[in-house]
Image (spheres, rainbow, N blue to C red):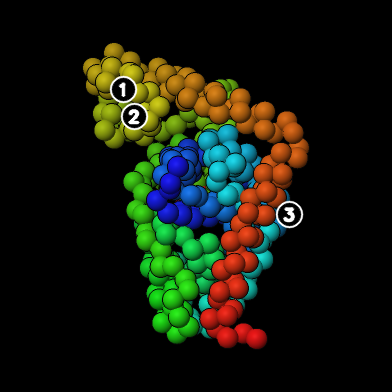
Amino acid sequence: MDKRGRVFSGARPTGRQHLGNYLGAIRNYVGFQDEYDCVYCVVDLHALTTLEDTGKLKEWTREMTLDWLAAGIRADETILFVQSHVPQVTELHTILSMVTPLGWLTRLPTFKEKVRQQPDNVNYGLVGYPVLMASDIALYKADIVPVGVDQAPHLEFTREIVRRFNHTFGEVLVEPQARHTEFTKVLGIDGEAKMSKSLNNHIEIASTPEEIWERVRVMVTDPARQYRRDPGHPEVCNVFSLHRFFSAGEVAQIEADCRSAAIGCVECKKRFAANLAGHFAPFRERRARFAADPDYVWDVLADGARRARAIADEVMGQVKAAVGLP
Ligand code: ATP
Ligand code: MG
């Protein structure tokens, strides 16, 4: 089938994926495969800019890849690989850094935030983070990059760097388009902050039904509902907002029963936990099968790297020729 272009996206290996990662990113990754050639990258080099402990990188790469594969990333079509396995990206990073004004980098809101977050570790790699991201995207001549609101400035930056390179050296690189994904901001079990691994308010999609219930049981619901007999307000309840995704058939009933106090929060959570466990049952089964073979993930990633390298070699040949490297 003819695809409409190439999608590139990368994610830092941060371990097992949670509902926020699933609804905000993985689901889109899976969907893009029907229309586009997809290149999905575990950006381990990017992870180095903030990691204090790199000892987990390998394990987290494996866990994240297992989640992606089990969720429906088709590694025979899609190129799924690890950033550092295709070192050409660091070469392009060096070349693109020569057409990047330093002021552009230090003015980016994401950089300023990192400086606030880790004032004692404002390393050179952190400043260059967006140049490395631009290199990932440009190296694979991606047409489309799915971005959430937080990453939008980085993609705009990538487009400017590509334009600058092409203007200086000739039309070699492709200016990517942002695809603003329907952003579903999933809140954590605290019902307040964005679900995130680092806040430990997350529910891992690979959880067993028992583990799901442990997390769902303590989820914060409608704060105004104190007693079982009080009518609930589904519109302000985080559990209800997630029912919308995982309880398709009974959302209307749950909403009505909550408002009329026919069910309490415990019952509502029990149904949510059961539906969540049911939704991810085939996922868990596939994941267990993939995980049983210790080589499977690494074989997939090695094959992905081989295919990625073929593209990278060709593009770097064009880039070096355009720049005039001997
Ligand atoms: P960390 O706590 O280390 O930042 P994280 O759990 O926030 O990790 P990221 O690696 O930052 O996860 O995010 C990976 C992808 O998942 C990104 O595309 C991000 O936009 C998406 N994502 C992460 N958390 C959420 C969330 N709560 N709701 C929606 N999307 C999310
Ligand atoms: Mg995050």
Residue in the image at 37% along x and 59% along y: 178
Q: Which residue is mark 1?
A: 251
Which is more N-terminal, label 3 or label 1?
A: 3
Amino acid type at image mark 1: Val
Q: Quadrant of the C terminus?
A: bottom right
Horizontal and vertical percent position of residue 278: 49, 21
Q: Which mark is residue 55?
A: 3
Which one is in front, 112 or 10?
10
User: Is residue 126 visible to the viewer in this orientation of the structure?
Assistant: no
| Direction from residue 116 to residue 317 in the image, left or right | right
Q: How many marks?
A: 3
Horizontal and vertical percent position of residue 286: 61, 28
Q: Which residue is mark 2?
A: 244
Under tag 1, what secondary structure? helix
Name the residue at the front extreme. 1
Residue in the image at 59% along x and 71% along y: 316
Amino acid type at image mark 3: Gly
Which one is in front, 120 or 82?
82
Up the image or down, 195 lies above or below 91; here it is above
- Mark 1–mark 3 Cα distance, whole angstroms, equals 43 Å
Under tag 2, what secondary structure? helix
Q: Quadrant of the N terminus?
A: top left
Q: What crowding class fits label 3: few (fewer than 14 Cα within 10 Å), some (14-19), or many (20 or more)?
A: few
Which is more N-terminal, label 3 or label 2?
A: 3
Residue in the image at 33% along x and 18% along y: 250
Amino acid type at image mark 2: Arg
For the residues labelled 1 and 2, say whether their Cβ atoms are less than 8 Å apart.
yes
